[in-house]
Structure formats: C-alpha cells, structure tokens
C-alpha cells in the first residue's frame, strides 16, 4: 500500500513537456527557485530568499561571539559555510533565471525531438539515463531530508538525554536547545524569544535543505543528460554507413545530423558550465573547510554522543554531495573523450575519397573532450574529490598535532 502511494506520487511529478527534468522542475517551483507563477508568488518567495541572507549574516555574527568556544565555533562554522553555499545556489537560479530557462528548454526540446523520431536505440539510451537520474534524485532527496531531520531533532534529544542538561536544570538554569547557532536582537534564552528563534531556524533549515537537494539533483540530471546524449551521438557516428549501398545524399544527411547534435551538446555544456562553475568553486572550498571542521569536532572530548551522531550524518552527507558532483563530472569528461571513436567504429572503409574527407573533419571536431569546471583552478573529477579528502585529512592531522603540543 505504501509502495503504491510512493509510485503514484512519483508519477505525479512527471511532466511530458520535460521528460528528464519534470520532478526537478516541480521541486524548484515548489520552493520558489523556478519562478514561473504569478507576480505575487514571485515576490513572496523572493522575500524568503532575501531573509536567508540576513540569517547567514546572523550566523556569522554569532560565530564571532563564539570564537573562544572551539566546539561551538566548529559547529557554527560548518553550518555557516553550507548556508553561504546554499545562498549562492539559490540566487544563481533566481538572478540567472533566463539562462537556466534557456538551458532547460534546449534539453527538453532535444529529448522531445528524439522521442518524435521514435528510434528504438535512441529511446533505450534516453530511458536508461532518465531512470538513473530518477533514482539519484529520490535517494538524494531522502538523504538530505534525513540529515535535516537529525539537524532539527538532535538538539532536543541532547536536551532530554544528556545528564549535563539535567544538572543545569536542577540548578535553575534553563539551557534551551539550539538547532543552529545564530544571533538575534532579542533574548533567545527565554520565551517568547526562544520560540520565535526556534521557528525561524526550523524554517531556514528546511528551506536550505530543499534548495541544496533540488539544485544538486537538477545539476546531476543535466550531467546525466550530457553523458547520455554523448553516448547517443557516438552511436549516430557508428551508424553513418548503416546501409551497405548508401548514397552520397544520405551520407551527407547523417554527417549533418552528427554535426548538429555535437553543436547542440557543446552549446548546452557551455551554458551549464558557466552557471555551475562559480558555485562549484566555492562549493569545493566550502566542503573542504566543512569536512575538516566536522572531523575535528568529532575528536573533541566535550562533543556529546548526540552531537557526534549529527556530525557523522552531516559529514557523510557532505562527502556524498561532493562525490556525486565529481563522479558525474568525471563521467562527462570520459564520455566526451570517447565520442570520436564512433567515427572509426563505423564502416568508413565503404566511403569514397570525398566522403572520407568529411569523416576526418567530423572526427577531428569530436576529438575535443570537455571538462565541467569548479572555478578557474580545478575541474569536477574523481582526482579532485580525492585531493579534497586528502586535504581534509592533512588538516585534521595538523590540528591533532597542535592539540597534542598544547596538552
């Protein structure tokens, strides 16, 4: 019964106008990033987006006041870094909406074109990467949702289960649990200030988690599209001489289709890379810092068990986030590096001298691999992921040695 409801809900997220990005676009619309509704709806959501900036400023302000408490400062810096990245992702969609719309329309138009042609090989490839994208999307939404749930629930569990809180309460001290460390211009240690602060923190955490989950899965879906369409282009190159007695006109038609498809993919790649690269530059730096802070916080003696539970879940989510981008970026590079092999795998030896010249030009054009960049210094690849993990471990080792020397 529950499975049937889940399947029914997933089907309602599909959109025939957007075969690949249907669920992603509905998620973006639900949380105000895909602004295609009424004017008042846009204004309301933009107000929410602007308030996230003030909330991040309040987190940074609180970090200054916590500079002498290492455990709280590390916890604050981890969430603040992620909040900054979340704001970047949010305003990337809002401020660059026309560019994102152009990218989405191009992707959907190409898929609808292939569906109209009804080529069984093409449909099989498209079905494969669409199904893969759905699995990643729904699993990632569950991961981010569970992480955010633990973020909200863990402080209250700590409040009821940790003996130190009970001792403080007996001493007429009321240490209310805090979901996130942020500064407010009113007293948050007593009601009603505490209730107001808690509600604001819950709303901000839900909005932030939703932005991260929806943006990341949308980006991964587009990367899956690029990879899948490159596989499809390679197949088209292999079938340039599908018929044994193919005339010159049919050959030119096949060659033109390969050129058109490649030009389309390069255009979509350049648009997507220009949108993603600045965000991923900050994202890679932010993940490095946040993973370091989380691991260091785990090693501190004053970190409670419930806090460690949250830190472990949070760190796993961050590592998976970074790995997801790097893995799929690496897939796009590897597939783009292999497209030209489709030309050489065709029946090129059937071609005349004039045809072979066209084939050489096509193969040379396709022999240009593409990288999804993370700023001007690195790209999204598995080696980048390994470098970030190594850097985090090196920082943790350095911090541990400094702690031992101080002790």
Image (cartoon, helix red, strand yellow):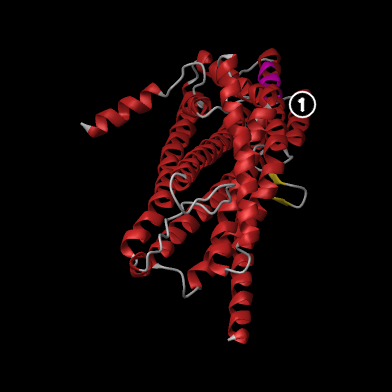
194 lies above or below 169: above
- Which residues fall within the magenta stretch? 253-259
Q: Residue furthest left?
A: 1
> What x and y, as percent, mark residue 89?
62, 38
Residue at 67%, 31% (x, y): give it.
348
376 lies above or below 49: below
In magenta stretch: residue 184: no
Please name the predominant secondary structure of the magenta segment in the image.
Answer: helix
Quarter of the figure with residue 396 = bottom right
Q: Is residue 243 visible?
A: no
For the residue carrying disc 1, how many other residues have a C-alpha within 10 Å: few (<14), some (14-19), or many (20+)?
Answer: some
Q: Which quarter shows the N terminus?
A: top left
Residue at 68%, 16% (x, y): give it.
253
Residue at 63%, 17% (x, y): give it.
246
- Return the residue nearer the eye: 78 or 199: 199
Q: Which residue is mark 1?
A: 358
What number of labels is visible? 1
> What x and y, as percent, mark residue 243?
57, 20
Quarter of the figure with residue 251 = top right
3 lies above or below 108: below
Q: Is residue 211 visible?
A: yes
- Return the residue nearer the eye: 363 or 110: 110
């Amino acid at each position: 019964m529950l499975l049937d409801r889940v399947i029914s809900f997933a089907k309602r997220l599909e959109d025939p106008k957007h075969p690949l990005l249907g669920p992603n676009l509905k998620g973006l619309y639900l949380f105000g990033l895909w602004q295609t509704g009424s004017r008042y709806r846009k204004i309301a959501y933009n107000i929410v987006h602007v308030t996230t900036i003030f909330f991040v400023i309040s987190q940074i302000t609180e970090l200054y006041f916590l500079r002498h408490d290492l455990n709280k400062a590390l916890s604050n810096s981890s969430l603040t870094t992620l909040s900054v990245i979340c704001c970047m992702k949010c305003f990337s969609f809002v401020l660059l909406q026309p560019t994102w719309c152009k990218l989405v329309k191009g992707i959907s138009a190409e898929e609808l074109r292939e569906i109209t042609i009804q080529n069984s090989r093409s449909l099989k490839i498209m079905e494969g990467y669409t199904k893969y994208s759905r699995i990643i999307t729904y699993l990632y939404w569950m991961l981010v949702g569970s992480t955010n749930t633990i973020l909200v629930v863990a402080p209250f569990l700590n409040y009821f289960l940790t003996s130190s809180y009970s001792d403080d309460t007996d001493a007429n001290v009321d240490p209310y649990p805090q979901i996130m460390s942020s500064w407010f211009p009113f007293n948050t240690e007593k009601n009603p200030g505490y209730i107001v602060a808690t509600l604001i923190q819950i709303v901000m955490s839900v909005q932030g988690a939703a932005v991260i989950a929806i943006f990341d899965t949308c980006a991964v879906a587009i990367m899956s599209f690029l990879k899948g369409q490159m596989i499809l282009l390679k197949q088209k190159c292999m079938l340039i001489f599908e018929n044994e007695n193919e005339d010159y006109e049919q050959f030119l038609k096949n060659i033109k289709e390969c050129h058109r498809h490649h030009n389309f993919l390069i255009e979509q790649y350049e648009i997507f890379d220009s949108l993603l690269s600045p965000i991923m530059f900050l994202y890679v730096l932010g993940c490095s810092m946040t993973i370091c802070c989380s691991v260091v916080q785990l090693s501190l003696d004053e970190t409670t068990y419930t806090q460690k539970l949250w830190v472990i879940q949070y760190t796993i989510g961050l590592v998976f986030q970074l790995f997801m981008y790097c893995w799929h970026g690496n897939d796009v590079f590897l597939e783009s590096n292999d497209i030209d092999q489709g030309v050489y795998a065709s029946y090129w030896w059937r071609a005349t001298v004039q045809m072979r010249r066209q084939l050489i030009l096509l193969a040379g054009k396709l022999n240009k691999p593409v990288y999804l960049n993370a700023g001007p210094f690195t790209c999204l690849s598995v080696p980048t992921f390994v470098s970030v993990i190594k850097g985090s471990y090196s920082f943790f080792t350095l911090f541990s040695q400094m702690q031992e020397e101080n002790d």
